[in-house]
Amino acid sequence: MKKTFLGLLIIFSSFYSCSDDNNSVVDTSTTISSIRFIGEQIIPDNFEFNGNIVGGLSSIDYANNKFYLISDAPNAPIRVYSADLNYTETEFTSINITSEVELLDTNNTSFINPIDPEALRIDTESSSMIWCSEGNINNGENPFIREATLNGDFKRDFTIPSIFEAKSTDTEGPRHNGVFESISLSVDKKGYWVGMELPLKEDGVEPIFAMDTDSPVRISYINKSTGKFEKQFAYELDKVSREIIGSGFNFTVNGLVELLEYDTNKFLALERSFTTGADDGGNNVKIYKVDASNATDVANFKGLNGANYVKATKTLLFDFESIRNQLSSIPGGNSAKVVDNIEGITFGPRLANGNLSLVLVADNNFSAFGKQLNQFVVFEVLP
């Protein structure tokens, strides 16, 4: 059964609205030279909406004069929130959660088995939500990319190439928790771009701290009309930003967590590195400008390891270390300033000066591994 919940409001400070009520306009005239930090807001980790804890906010998009947020809660209800974010050129003042929609399975009932929702985009032309799950590779469950109505009803599955399906070998297929993590609408509105978080096993190794590695991830274009994957390019990941601190459970990762096309074959790519043991949460987050204009189409490459091809180029746009000291600490924790597990990025409405805004959100993992933040950060885009 479809469930839509409306009307509850969460307000953290006095109300300010953005400069206009129109959707942001991103087309082939968009240029980005830099971004300027405006402010941060936090949703408390104990805040509930319709009886569900608000957390795991792994993606954000702006359309229809509001923001959409997908929660990566593994069990039903798999939910998408609508929200108003209130900011100007000089301050970010409040977040208002306004509604919740449940995403339904192919039979238009609640999901029975756990899934891993990661990315969300709103296609206003088809009045649809495009979203993905990483599946569960260790359990042999395939990832998927789906289209749903704005009310959460299932519309269709997109055809996933076999290279992205779960495999039981150590030499081929996707890595667990490293599959479809990012989605972007194409600027021509004819398709969608989807990105892997980590390399396929036949494409390269996972990034490490000690050295640079050959760690390309595939970014694929889906034709909206046919629902099929077409062209594809490779994007090289950075190495892990920090060395492991301390003993006990040790883990590091660096991956592509979101993608945003702003001009033909030009993207903002969000990379997040994580290392256990740090008192500031262990996350390092960077935004890159990516140009795939001269990249090789690798759609027919069975493996990239040892292959001859040209990757997309990348240029650092912003490093969150430059604003870490302006961000929040964990309530009740130490005084370390936190760049949390930022995984979502979207252009927001234009500011009063006509420049685009840029909004990012962190997935707090429902604080399952220790206290984290439902962190929202807003920037001005400077052309």
Image (spheres, rainbow, N blue to C red):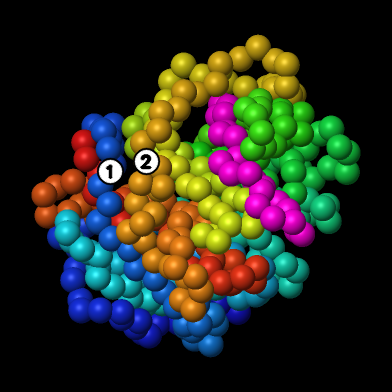
Residue 334, image x, y percentages: 49, 70
Q: Position of residue 174 (x, y in %)?
A: 74, 41
Q: Residue 263 location in percent, x, y? A: 34, 32
Cβ–Cβ under 8 Å for marks 2 and 1: yes
Helix, strand or loop: magenta stretch = loop
In the rendered image, the vertical position of residue 134 relative to residue 238, given as above or below: below
Outermost right residue = 169
- Horizontal relation, residue 190 to residue 102: left or right: left
Secondary structure beneath label 1: strand
Whether residue 161 is visible, yes or no, is no
Q: Is residue 285 above or below residue 307?
A: below
Residue farthest toward the bottom in the current orientation of the protein = 51
The answer to whether residue 39 is visible is yes
Task: Residue at 73% x, 72% y: name it.
Answer: 112
For residue 318, the mark is 2
Q: CA distance from mark 2 to mark 1?
A: 7 Å
Span highlighted in magenta in the image: 233-256
Residue located farthest toward the top when viewing the structure as drawn: 308
Residue 269 located left or right of residue 368: left
In percent of width and height, residue 192 lies at 49, 41
Amino acid found under the numbered disc labelled 1: Ile
Secondary structure beneath dot 2 equals strand
The amino acid pointed to by label 2 is Phe
Q: Name the residue rendered at 76%, 29% in the picture.
A: 202
Q: Residue at x 49, y 78 (%)?
A: 332
- On screen, residue 295 versus residue 75, left or right, reads left
Name the residue that disc number 1 marks: 35
Q: Which quadrant is the N terminus positioned in?
A: bottom right
- 250 falls in the magenta region: yes
Please tell me in which quadrant of the rendered image residue 160 appears: top right
